[in-house]
Image: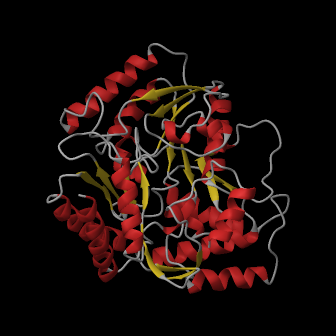
């Protein structure tokens, strides 16, 4: 393993983050488990950053990929592509967006990049509203709208970005207010901001902030924002790269917790739909999607083999009601972790929905983030046979828990027990 780590460091960028003091090589997986190069098995509560959404080595997806590979892997968007059309039809219908058109990419970053291109072109404005503590990808334009310093390596950007309050409920100047007061204060802040700037193209927001540590506003905030934005013609882009496909349990899309004012104008997706295959995409109203006045293609977006995987994965997800499973099992897991947190002074908050759960750590007796403890818990969980993630705003001190949506009650209990032991060791 050390040899592989040395080789990694010799040829890959220094800024390519690796988990653990002794980095892990994962060689194979099955269901909710993965194995490392030493043959040790782990319960996977992070799914390749919320990407192995259904299960590792899911037979239905494996079979679809294998059969498609035996026919043709790729032809580009210059030719008609039956699997791409079929998956686009399914996603357009599920999106809730009227006259929906779908464009496939290879990642969430590229999906958000495309959404920004559409919005700025449609509105003839390069001003974009984004949320503090947000993350939208690693491209030049995506880091320009990312409100999380840890993941924004450059202040240079083709966009003028203005950051809005509201993505983090329990920190910031409005944290002391009740939910209705919080929403009202954020709306007033948005109105004030709009009075000081040129008309923006769009607001882009994650319904639950992923890299930011699974934080979210009260339900209805973005619906209230939408009412204000609509008065100014400003578009709403819902970044569903991490919240889509039923992960939150209560809703198929994260925007539906804010659906009082209707669906977003543009929706972006990626990660889980491919269950590990590289699929991203944008859904938008026809007039927005069709606003570009030059040709465009996607060489690898919507290629046959990834579309076959996406169709098989989506079918499995819907047929086995994995959204319902996320709601049931995720609810049990959250309550179990909250019971543990009540006994530990270093756990500031357990939050989330469905199988998208954040455990924020702080130095006992304070509100100060505790990234050292988060790193220690990550290591201890691994030693106990559990893989989790981490994230957060000003400092990376939130544990991120996002298992495949087929997680069983027994596996949830097993993972919670390991995590409890790791937390108790830290505090």
Q: Is residue 61 above or below residue 78?
A: below
Residue at the spot x=40%, y=75% of the render?
321
Q: Quadrant of the C terminus?
A: bottom left
Instruction: Judge by depth and name the residue closer to the eye, 403 or 245.
Output: 403
Q: Is residue 275 left or right of 403 when viewed as pictured?
A: right
- In the picture as drawn, the residue positioned furthest to the top comes out as 196
Q: Determine which quarter of the picture holds residue 378.
A: bottom left
Residue at the spot x=49%, y=83% of the render?
40
Residue at the spot x=50%, y=77% of the render?
55
Q: Residue 113's x, y, as percent?
A: 65, 42
Q: Is residue 356 above or below residue 217?
A: below
Q: Is residue 161 left or right of 163 when viewed as pictured?
A: right
Q: Residue 48's x, y, as percent?
A: 53, 66
Instruction: Judge by depth and name the residue closer to the eye, 1 or 218.
Output: 1
Residue at the spot x=44%, y=25% of the render?
231
Q: Determine which quarter of the picture holds residue 43.
A: bottom left
Q: Visible in this render: residue 56? A: yes
Q: Is residue 316 above or below residue 11?
A: below
Q: Is residue 64 left or right of 410 when viewed as pictured?
A: right
Looking at the rendered structure, the number of numbered marks drawn on it comes to 0
- In the picture as drawn, the residue positioned furthest to the left comes out as 343
Q: Is residue 186 above or below residue 366?
A: above
Q: Residue 128's x, y, as percent?
A: 55, 29
Q: Residue 400's x, y, as percent?
A: 39, 58
Q: Is residue 170 left or right of 320 when viewed as pictured?
A: left
Instruction: Judge by depth and name the residue closer to the eye, 403 or 327.
Output: 403
């Amino acid at each position: 393993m050390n040899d592989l780590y040395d080789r990694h460091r010799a040829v890959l960028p220094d800024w390519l983050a690796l988990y653990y003091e002794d980095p892990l090589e994962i060689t194979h997986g099955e269901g909710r488990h993965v194995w490392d190069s030493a043959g040790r098995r782990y319960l996977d509560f992070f799914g390749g950053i919320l990407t192995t959404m259904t299960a590792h080595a899911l037979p239905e997806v494996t079979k679809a990929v294998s059969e498609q590979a035996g026919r043709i892997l790729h032809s580009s968007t210059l030719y008609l592509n039956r699997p791409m059309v079929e998956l686009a039809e399914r996603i357009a219908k599920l999106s809730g967006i009227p006259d929906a058109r779908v464009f496939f990419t290879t990642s969430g970053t590229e999906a958000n990049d495309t959404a920004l291109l559409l919005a700025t072109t449609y509105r003839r404005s390069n001003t974009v509203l984004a949320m503090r503590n947000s993350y939208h990808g690693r491209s030049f334009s995506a880091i320009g709208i990312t409100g999380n310093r840890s993941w924004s390596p450059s202040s240079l950007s083709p966009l003028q970005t203005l950051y809005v309050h509201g993505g983090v409920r329990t920190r910031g100047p409005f944290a002391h207010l009740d939910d209705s007061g919080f929403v009202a204060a954020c709306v007033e802040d948005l109105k004030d901001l709009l009075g000081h700037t040129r008309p923006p193209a769009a607001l882009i927001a994650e319904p639950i902030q992923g890299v930011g540590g699974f934080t979210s506003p009260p339900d209805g905030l973005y619906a209230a924002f939408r009412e204000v934005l609509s008065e100014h013609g400003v578009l709403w882009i819902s970044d569903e790269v991490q919240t889509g496909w039923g992960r939150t349990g209560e809703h198929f899309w994260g925007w539906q917790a804010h659906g009082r004012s209707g669906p977003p104008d543009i929706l972006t997706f990626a990660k889980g739909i491919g269950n590990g295959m590289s699929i991203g995409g944008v859904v938008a109203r026809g007039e927005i999607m069709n606003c570009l006045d030059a040709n465009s293609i996607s060489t690898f977006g919507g290629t046959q083999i990834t579309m076959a995987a996406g169709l098989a994965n989506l079918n499995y997800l819907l047929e086995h009601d994995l959204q319902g499973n996320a709601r049931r099992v995720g609810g049990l897991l959250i309550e179990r972790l909250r019971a543990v947190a009540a006994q530990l002074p270093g756990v500031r908050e357990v939050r989330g929905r469905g199988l998208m759960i954040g455990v924020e750590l702080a130095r006992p007796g304070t509100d100060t983030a505790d990234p050292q403890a988060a790193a220690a818990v990550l290591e201890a969980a691994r030693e106990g046979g559990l893989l989790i993630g981490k994230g957060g705003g000003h400092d990376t001190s939130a544990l991120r828990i996002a298992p495949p949506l087929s997680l069983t009650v027994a596996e949830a209990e097993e993972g919670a027990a390991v995590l409890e032991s790791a937390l108790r060791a830290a505090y």
